[in-house]
């Protein structure tokens, strides 16, 4: 019996807004200090939606977006913010607190 494997593609799993949001949240959890990981995740979401439409919505070139969001590019934070806004997403900040460790007051 021959085992048939299919190539796994994230785009097959980014069908809804919820899928995309959960995927990006998971990527932020896993990325650590790797900004390319987040850029690549945004690129995956952009491809699932439409890179051409994203280019129109951000005012950036489609090819430059492909490069910047490939995981190999080095997009500016401004580009990342434009992409996030154009994708209809928001960033939220939350204090990183270890379990059972109180926050230290700032004076």
Image (cartoon, grey):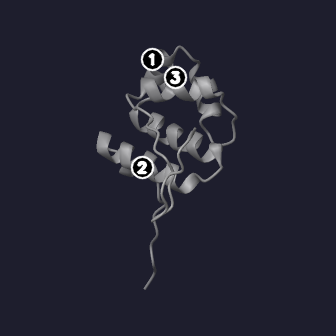
Q: Residue at x 50, y 52 (%)?
A: 103
Q: Position of residue 105 (x, y in %)?
A: 53, 45
Q: What secondary structure is found at the residue carrying circle 1?
A: helix
Q: Pointer 2: residues within 10 angstroms few (<14), some, or many (20+)? A: some
- Residues under numbered marks 3 and 2 in contact, where contact means CB atoms less than 8 Å apart: no
**Can residue 98 be seen here?**
yes
18 to the left or right of 100: left
What residue did someone put label 2 on?
A: 23
What residue did someone put label 1 on?
A: 57
**Can residue 16 be seen here?**
no
Q: CA distance from mark 1 to mark 3?
A: 9 Å
Name the disc covering residue 82, or none. Answer: 3
Foreground mark, 1 or 3, reads 3
Q: What secondary structure is found at the residue carrying circle 2?
A: helix
51 to the left or right of 35: left
Which is nearer the eye, 87 or 1?
87
Q: Position of residue 72 (x, y in %)?
A: 69, 41
């Amino acid at each position: 019996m021959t085992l048939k494997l299919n190539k796994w593609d994230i785009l097959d799993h980014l069908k809804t807004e919820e899928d995309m949001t959960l995927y990006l949240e998971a990527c932020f959890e896993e990325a650590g200090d790797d900004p390319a990981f987040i850029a690549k995740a945004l690129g995956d979401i952009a491809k699932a939606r439409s890179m051409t439409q994203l280019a129109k919505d951000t005012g950036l070139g489609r090819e430059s977006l492909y490069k910047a969001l490939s995981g190999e590019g080095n997009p500016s934070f401004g580009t990342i913010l434009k992409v996030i806004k154009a994708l209809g997403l928001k960033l939220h900040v939350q204090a990183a607190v270890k379990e059972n460790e109180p926050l230290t007051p700032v004076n």
